[in-house]
Amino acid sequence: MIENNEGLIPLVAFNYQPKIEEYVDELLGQKVRRIFHTDFNNYSEKEKNVLNEYHNYLKEINFSLPENYTDEDALRQLQGNDYDIKKSHKEIVHEIEWKKINLPINFNDDIKNVLNTGFFYIHGRDRCFRPLIFFNPMKYDNKKFPFEIWQRATEYFIEFLIQKCFINGRIENWNMIVDCKELSMTNIPWDLQNLFKNIKGVYRCRLYKLYLLNLSGIFNFLWNLSVKIIGPTVEAKATKIENDKGKYSDLFKLINKNQVEKKYGGNAENVEIGNYFPLSFQCNEYYSELDEKNDKDGDIYNKIEIDNVNFDGEIFYEMNPKRNLK
């Protein structure tokens, strides 16, 4: 499907070794795993125990998981469902059935046209090479394309992101930047919530940070109300970014300004409509404000050396032999 994968994963990312706190973070006073593809022995005792408990539960109910459904997949669901075995199993069955019915997704002109509206698009990466996903809800127009096309394009976009922009064991999360500009009570696309309803439980534990840009007073109020629905975990990941006269300064604590378009306070040229997907934007500068303040080891990005890069066409890079593209 992709004619040219160049730039989807920067070469330097393949030799990047995440720090311990990038594998397991602390959120709301609890340990939260961010990177799941690691040796079983690296899991905490709690994670090992809950996986063993789940496998015992599968034996009790005489249920077999597909061969390609891994412990990493199961652990995502378990963590995402607060380690509730029965609830997690229900979500796992839904995930397996959903993927069996809906994947693979055939790329077509309708999907391409939707993604080229700028509704969802990838532009740059943060200091740990996590992709930056820009979401513009005002681009949604169910008169231009039927709801089913928007839904299919969203599902394709997420699959594309996971299969083409991640490296298992190194990069397994994305940042989402939501532009709330021009949203009002009269023009908010209310059926957007249905767009994510079916896939809510399919792609667990992928969000690293949620940045909310250009929140108006009314939407700031609605956000505070919606926290009760979305839950404390998503709230803890969210940051409201002040416009700051177009500077969006708080956005760049973990992100280099050269990774972001000028319209959001960065230095990169704004992407023109029709050129959002697949995006060929490349920038080799990842150093952020956080690195400038806490640089004890020097510029890590200048120390990483590239070796033994294998090219294999569609997958493009395959440095991790355990990488499994579904």
Image: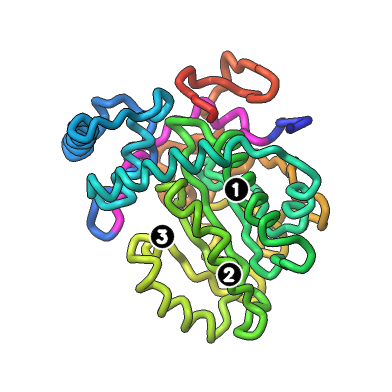
Magenta segment boundaries in residue numbering: 8-27
Give neighbour class at mark 2: few <14, some 14-19, many 20+ (Cα, 10 Å).
some
Give the vertical position of 63 relative to 185 (above or below).
above
Q: Which mark is residue 129?
A: none
Q: Position of residue 59 (x, y in %)?
A: 20, 29
Reading the image, the residue beneath label 1 is: 155
Q: Position of residue 307 (x, y in %)?
A: 57, 16
Q: Which mark is residue 213?
A: 2
Which label lies toward us, 1 or 2? 1
Question: Magenta stretch containing residue 24, yes or no?
Answer: yes
Determine whether the residue tagged by mark 3 lies in a helix, strand or loop.
Answer: helix
Which quadrant of the rendered structure holds the N terminus?
top right
Give neighbour class at mark 1: few <14, some 14-19, many 20+ (Cα, 10 Å).
many
Q: Which residue is situated farthest in the front direction here?
A: 62
Q: Earlier in the sequence, mark 2 or mark 3?
A: 2
Q: Earlier in the sequence, mark 1 or mark 3?
A: 1
Determine whether the residue tagged by mark 2 lies in a helix, strand or loop.
Answer: strand
Reading the image, the residue beneath label 3 is: 237
**Residue positioned 33% across, 37% down in the render:** 74
Side of 177 relative to 225 (left or right) = right
Q: Position of residue 124 (x, y in %)?
A: 64, 47
Give the vertical position of 84 relative to 170 (above or below).
below
